[in-house]
Amino acid sequence: MTSTYPGVILALVLPLHLALLIMEGILLSLFKSDITLWRTIYAPLLPSLWQTRNKLLRLRQEIQEQRRISLKEWMAVFRLRPYKMEMLFKHGLPEVR
C-alpha cells in the first residue's frame, strides 16, 4: 500500500487504514477474549512501520518512478466495500491459530 498508492490518495487513506487496523485488532481481541492477538499481531504494527520507514520510502520512490498507468486506471480495480468486510459478513469472525 505505502509503495503503490498515488501520493495524494496515500496521504488520505493511510491514516484511516491504520486507525481501522488498530480498531480491528482491539475488537478482535475483545470478541475472542484473547489479548495475545493484540500483543503479537496488531501492537507491533506501528513500531515496525516506523523502524522500516526509510526502506519503505526508498521502495516507494522506486515503484513510483516506474509507474505506467493513470490514476483513473489505478482506481478502476477498487471496490466500495473492503474485502475484509465481505469476508466478515460471509464467514464471521476469523479463527486465529
Image (tube, helix red, strand yellow):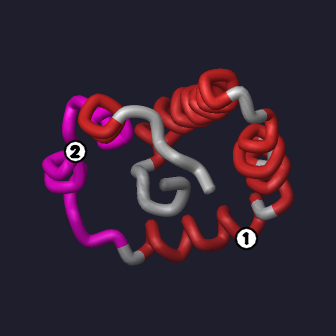
Q: Nearer the viewer, residue 44 or 13?
A: 44
Residue 6 percent coordinates (x, y): 41, 50
How far across and how far down the image is residue 12, in percent?
49, 30
Q: Is residue 92 left or right of residue 43?
A: left
Badges 2 and 1: C-beta atoms under 8 Å apart? no
Decide which of 94, 64 is in the foreground and name it.
94
Q: Residue at x 23, y 54 (%)?
A: 74
Residue shown at the point (68%, 30%) measured from the top left: 29
The magenta region covers 67-86
Query: Could you say which quadrant of the image residue 66 lies in?
Result: bottom left
Q: Position of residue 55 (x, y in %)?
A: 73, 70
Among numbered discs 2 and 1, the one appearing first in the sequence: 1
Q: Quadrant of the C terminus?
A: bottom right
Characterize the local packing of mark 1: few (<14), some (14-19) or many (20 or more) Cα atoms within 10 angstroms. Answer: few
Location of residue 32 (image quadrant): top right
Element marked by disc 2? loop
Is 28 covered by the magenta stretch? no
Q: Which residue is mark 2?
A: 78
x 75%, y 53%: residue: 49
Vertical side of 31 occupied by 10: above or below: below
Residue 15 appears in view: no
Local secondary structure at mark 1: helix
Alpha carbon separation for disc pair 2 and 1: 26 Å
Q: Amino acid at mark 2?
A: Phe
Amino acid at the residue labelled 1: Lys
Q: Is residue 59 above or below residue 74?
A: below
Observer-nearest of 96 and 11:
96
Provide the residue designation for mark 1.
55
As drawn, is 40 to the left or to the right of 8? Answer: right
Q: Nearer the viewer, mark 2 or mark 1?
A: 2
